[in-house]
Amino acid sequence: MTFRHIEDAARAALLELGLSLPKSFEPDRFHMVDDQDGKRGNGAGRLKIFADGKGGYCQNWKTGERKSFFLEGKGQ
């Protein structure tokens, strides 16, 4: 899937891993997010958008799943 905005790519990756969305998508910093199946504030996930704003990755620490995302739609 191709995305025009890095926030859309991040949203798709987070939801695919069962993670909640952060309050902001500020680049070049780690965002702590919750697992959708857990208690609020569980901090089971992390999101980072790269400084160039063209990609990033997220990880669900509860399941161990990790996903990269890019504006071109490539990722794992």
Image (tube, rainbow, N blue to C red):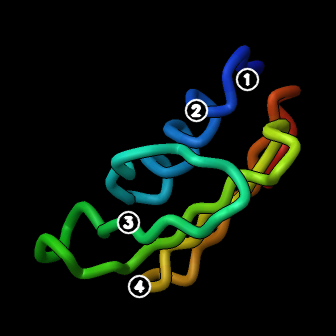
Mark nearer the N terminus (2 vs 4): 2
> Residue under circle 4?
62
Decide: few, some or many residues near mark 2? Use Cα within 10 Å; few <14, some 14-19, many ≥20.
many
- Disc 2 is placed on an element classified as helix
Instruction: Name the amino acid type tagged 4.
Output: Lys
Instruction: Name the amino acid type tagged 1.
Output: Met
Decide: few, some or many residues near mark 3? Use Cα within 10 Å; few <14, some 14-19, many ≥20.
many
- The CA span between labels 4 and 1 is 26 Å
Q: Residue furthest top?
A: 4
> Residue under circle 2?
7
- The CA span between labels 2 and 4 is 23 Å
Mark nearer the N terminus (2 vs 1): 1
- The CA span between labels 1 and 3 is 23 Å
Instruction: Name the amino acid type tagged 3.
Output: Val
- Disc 1 is placed on an element classified as loop
Choose top left, top right, bottom left or bottom right for residue 3: top right
The image shows residue 41, relative to residue 23, as above or below, that is below
